[in-house]
Amino acid sequence: MPSRRSAVSVVAVSKKPDSAAKRARQAEKRRIYNRSHKSEIKSRMRKVFEALGKLKKATAPSPEDLIPIEKLIAEAYSSIDKAVKVGTLHRNTGGHRKSRLSRRKKAVEIHHGWYKPAMVA
Protein backbone atom coordinates (compact mmCIF):
# COMPACT_ATOMS: atom_id res chain seq x y z
CA MET A 1 0.00 0.00 0.00
CA PRO A 2 1.45 3.43 -0.90
CA SER A 3 2.10 5.83 1.98
CA ARG A 4 -0.42 8.60 2.28
CA ARG A 5 0.92 12.11 2.57
CA SER A 6 -1.06 15.03 3.84
CA ALA A 7 -1.98 17.60 1.20
CA VAL A 8 -1.51 20.36 3.78
CA SER A 9 2.16 19.61 4.29
CA VAL A 10 2.79 19.73 0.55
CA VAL A 11 1.10 23.11 0.17
CA ALA A 12 2.87 24.58 3.21
CA VAL A 13 6.25 23.94 1.62
CA SER A 14 5.50 26.26 -1.32
CA LYS A 15 6.20 30.00 -1.18
CA LYS A 16 3.75 32.58 0.14
CA PRO A 17 1.18 33.90 -2.27
CA ASP A 18 1.98 37.36 -3.61
CA SER A 19 -0.88 38.96 -1.67
CA ALA A 20 0.40 37.57 1.63
CA ALA A 21 3.90 38.81 0.89
CA LYS A 22 2.54 42.26 0.05
CA ARG A 23 0.53 42.31 3.29
CA ALA A 24 3.65 41.38 5.23
CA ARG A 25 5.58 44.24 3.58
CA GLN A 26 2.76 46.69 4.35
CA ALA A 27 2.52 45.52 7.95
CA GLU A 28 6.27 45.95 8.46
CA LYS A 29 6.19 49.44 6.97
CA ARG A 30 3.24 50.39 9.19
CA ARG A 31 4.93 48.92 12.28
CA ILE A 32 8.04 51.05 11.73
CA TYR A 33 5.93 54.15 11.09
CA ASN A 34 3.81 53.56 14.23
CA ARG A 35 6.90 52.88 16.31
CA SER A 36 8.47 56.19 15.30
CA HIS A 37 5.27 58.07 16.11
CA LYS A 38 5.02 56.45 19.55
CA SER A 39 8.68 57.14 20.22
CA GLU A 40 8.21 60.80 19.31
CA ILE A 41 5.24 61.08 21.68
CA LYS A 42 7.17 59.46 24.54
CA SER A 43 10.14 61.77 23.97
CA ARG A 44 7.98 64.89 23.94
CA MET A 45 6.12 63.80 27.08
CA ARG A 46 9.40 63.06 28.85
CA LYS A 47 10.70 66.54 28.01
CA VAL A 48 7.55 68.13 29.46
CA PHE A 49 7.72 66.04 32.63
CA GLU A 50 11.41 66.84 33.14
CA ALA A 51 10.79 70.58 32.63
CA LEU A 52 7.85 70.51 35.06
CA GLY A 53 9.95 68.60 37.61
CA LYS A 54 12.69 71.23 37.44
CA LEU A 55 10.14 74.02 37.79
CA LYS A 56 8.53 72.32 40.79
CA LYS A 57 11.91 72.05 42.55
CA ALA A 58 12.95 75.60 41.65
CA THR A 59 13.06 78.18 44.40
CA ALA A 60 11.10 81.39 43.78
CA PRO A 61 9.98 80.71 40.18
CA SER A 62 7.62 83.08 38.40
CA PRO A 63 4.51 82.20 36.37
CA GLU A 64 6.39 83.35 33.26
CA ASP A 65 8.62 80.29 33.65
CA LEU A 66 5.64 78.22 32.48
CA ILE A 67 5.59 79.78 28.99
CA PRO A 68 8.33 77.58 27.47
CA ILE A 69 6.77 74.53 29.12
CA GLU A 70 3.40 75.40 27.60
CA LYS A 71 5.08 75.43 24.17
CA LEU A 72 6.46 71.95 24.87
CA ILE A 73 2.99 70.83 25.94
CA ALA A 74 1.49 72.22 22.73
CA GLU A 75 4.04 70.27 20.66
CA ALA A 76 3.25 67.10 22.62
CA TYR A 77 -0.50 67.64 22.09
CA SER A 78 0.10 68.11 18.38
CA SER A 79 2.07 64.89 18.00
CA ILE A 80 -0.51 62.97 20.05
CA ASP A 81 -3.36 64.32 17.90
CA LYS A 82 -1.51 63.40 14.70
CA ALA A 83 -0.92 59.86 15.96
CA VAL A 84 -4.61 59.52 16.82
CA LYS A 85 -5.61 60.91 13.42
CA VAL A 86 -3.58 58.34 11.46
CA GLY A 87 -4.57 55.47 13.77
CA THR A 88 -1.30 54.87 15.59
CA LEU A 89 -3.01 55.53 18.93
CA HIS A 90 -6.60 54.96 19.96
CA ARG A 91 -8.41 58.23 20.65
CA ASN A 92 -8.97 57.33 24.30
CA THR A 93 -5.25 56.65 24.72
CA GLY A 94 -4.49 60.02 23.15
CA GLY A 95 -6.91 61.74 25.51
CA HIS A 96 -5.41 59.91 28.48
CA ARG A 97 -1.89 61.06 27.59
CA LYS A 98 -2.99 64.67 27.07
CA SER A 99 -4.77 64.55 30.41
CA ARG A 100 -1.58 63.32 32.12
CA LEU A 101 0.30 66.32 30.75
CA SER A 102 -2.30 68.85 31.87
CA ARG A 103 -2.70 67.26 35.33
CA ARG A 104 1.04 67.41 35.92
CA LYS A 105 1.12 71.08 34.84
CA LYS A 106 -1.80 71.90 37.13
CA ALA A 107 -0.06 70.15 40.04
CA VAL A 108 2.97 72.43 39.57
CA GLU A 109 0.73 75.50 39.39
CA ILE A 110 -1.04 74.50 42.62
CA HIS A 111 2.29 73.72 44.29
CA HIS A 112 3.55 77.27 43.65
CA GLY A 113 0.20 78.92 44.42
CA TRP A 114 -0.42 80.18 40.88
CA TYR A 115 -3.70 78.29 40.65
CA LYS A 116 -6.35 77.92 43.32
CA PRO A 117 -8.90 75.16 42.66
CA ALA A 118 -12.50 76.29 43.04
CA MET A 119 -14.19 74.91 46.11
CA VAL A 120 -17.23 72.84 45.18
CA ALA A 121 -20.12 73.36 47.59
Image: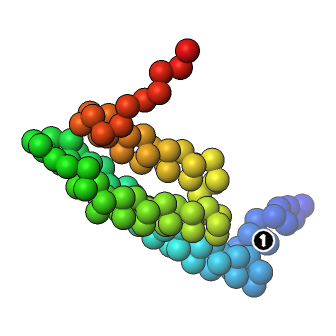
Extreme residue in the left direction: 59
Q: Amino acid at mark 1?
A: Val
Quarter of the image for residue 68 reads bottom left
Identity of the residue drawn at 89% across and 61% down: 1
Extreme residue in the bottom direction: 18
From the image, which quarter does the C terminus lie in? top right
Identity of the residue drawn at 49% across and 66% down: 79
Q: Relative to the observer, which residue lies in front, 68 or 116?
A: 116
Q: Position of residue 37 (x, y in %)?
A: 48, 68
Q: Relative to the observer, which residue lies in front, 36 or 28?
A: 36
Q: Position of residue 28 (x, y in %)?
A: 57, 74
Regarding residue 50, the answer to whether it shows in the image is no
Helix, strand or loop status at disc 1: helix
Quarter of the image for residue 21 reads bottom right
Colour scheme employed for the rendering of this structure = rainbow
Does residue 4 sit above or below 105 in this rendering? below
Regarding residue 84, the answer to whether it shows in the image is yes
Q: Position of residue 26 (x, y in %)?
A: 65, 78
Q: Is residue 37 left or right of residue 60?
A: right
Does residue 80 sit above or below 29 in this rendering? above
Does residue 110 sit above or below 76 in this rendering? above
Q: Which residue is mark 1?
A: 10
